[in-house]
């Protein structure tokens, strides 16, 4: 009986050793594959084989992965954002209209505008916010999503983080309110909202140009937004 017990224990020990060896080989293989992938990525990047030109779009699969990762990242971060109860107020829309015209319309367009010179050169192309081009989330979540994107921006997309530029949360909510009402707005109604808005106005302060003495004011060059010829 003792010999049988010892034999069974030895068999169990051998089985455990075989299982551990198998697991160790799988783990080493997985780590080897990870390091090989990292090395291959470094070689591809070093050789310059990745085309970063804005006029060379990603493949369909890569674009889908990037879009999925972006939406999951945003969804993870908007849970604690609660829109103000007066988001639908005409006053918020009025204030947001001028900022949209000044800060957003060149990329995201206005009602009745088919495209712009800047938007044609951007990749990925900014969404046309006057069109209902995406499946809407439940409204509070959709407005929280808009607020988060305006405030924090999107890396490598041309979408700036307006909050980092000094735009207050209240001003961002005003802009969110206007964008929420933008789909279906007629060109004439858009122009009336912008005309009544008082123009580009929010709490952000322009950054001092490099080399400007502390406390000094640097005169910003005038920028002509009129149509120009090439």
Image (cartoon, grey):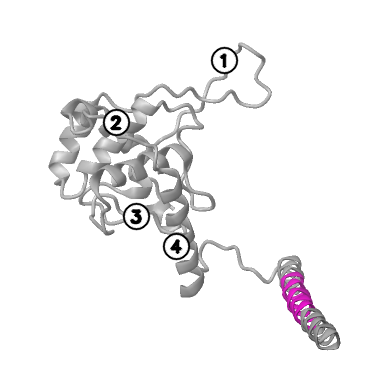
In the image, farthest residue toward the front: 1
* Residue 148, quarter of the rendered image: top left
Q: Are marks 4 and 2 in contact (CB under 8 Å)?
A: no
* Residue 129 sits above or below residue 171 on the image: below
Q: Which residue is mark 4?
A: 68
Magenta highlight on residue 26? yes
Residue 38 seen anywhere in this rendered image of the structure: yes
The x, y position of residue 27, in whole percent, is: 74, 74
Q: Which residue is mark 1?
A: 217
Q: Are marks 3 and 1 in contact (CB under 8 Å)?
A: no
Tag nearer the camera, 4 or 2: 4
Q: Between marks 3 and 1, how big is the CA–CA gap? A: 36 Å
Whole-number angstrom distance, CA of label 1 to CA of label 2: 29 Å
Can residue 59 be seen in this snapshot?
Answer: no
Magenta stretch bounds: 18-35
Labels 4, 3: front one: 4
Q: In the picture provided, is 21 more to the left or to the right than 108?
A: right
In the displayed structure, does residue 82 sit left or right of residue 50? left
Q: What's the residue at 46%, 28% (across, down)?
A: 222
Is the C-beta separation of discs 2 and 3 under 8 Å? no
Q: Earlier in the sequence, mark 1 or mark 2?
A: 2
SS of the residue at dot 2?
helix
Give neighbour class at mark 4: few <14, some 14-19, many 20+ (Cα, 10 Å): few
Along the viewing direction, whichever of 71 and 54 lies nearer the viewer: 71
At label 2, counting other C-alpha atoms closer than 10 Å, the crowd grade (few under 14, some 14-19, many 20 or more) is many
Predominant SS along the magenta part: helix
The circle drawn on residue 127 is 3
Task: Classify mark 1: residues with Cα within 10 Å, few (<14), some (14-19) or many (20+).
Answer: few
For label 2, the residue is 174
């Amino acid at each position: 009986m003792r010999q049988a017990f010892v034999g069974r224990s030895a068999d169990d020990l051998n089985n455990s050793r075989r299982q551990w060896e198998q697991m160790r080989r799988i783990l080493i293989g997985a780590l080897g594959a990870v390091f090989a992938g990292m090395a291959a990525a470094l070689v591809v990047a070093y050789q310059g084989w990745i085309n970063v030109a804005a006029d060379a779009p990603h493949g369909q699969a890569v674009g889908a992965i990037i879009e999925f990762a972006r939406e999951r990242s945003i969804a993870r971060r908007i849970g604690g954002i609660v829109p103000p109860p007066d988001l639908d107020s005409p006053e918020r829309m009025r204030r947001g209209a001028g900022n949209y015209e000044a800060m957003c319309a060149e990329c995201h367009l206005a009602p009745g505008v088919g495209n712009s010179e800047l938007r044609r050169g951007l990749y990925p192309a900014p969404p046309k916010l006057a069109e209902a081009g995406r499946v809407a989330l439940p409204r509070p979540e959709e407005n929280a999503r808009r607020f988060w994107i305006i405030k924090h921006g999107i890396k490598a997309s041309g979408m700036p983080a307006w909050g980092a530029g000094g735009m207050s949360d209240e001003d961002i909510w005003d802009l969110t309110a206007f964008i929420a009402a933008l789909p279906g707005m007629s060109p004439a109604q858009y122009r009336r909202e912008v005309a009544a808005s008082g123009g580009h106005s929010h709490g952000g302060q322009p950054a001092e140009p490099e080399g400007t003495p502390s406390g000094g004011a640097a005169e910003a060059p005038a920028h002509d937004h009129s149509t120009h010829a090439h």
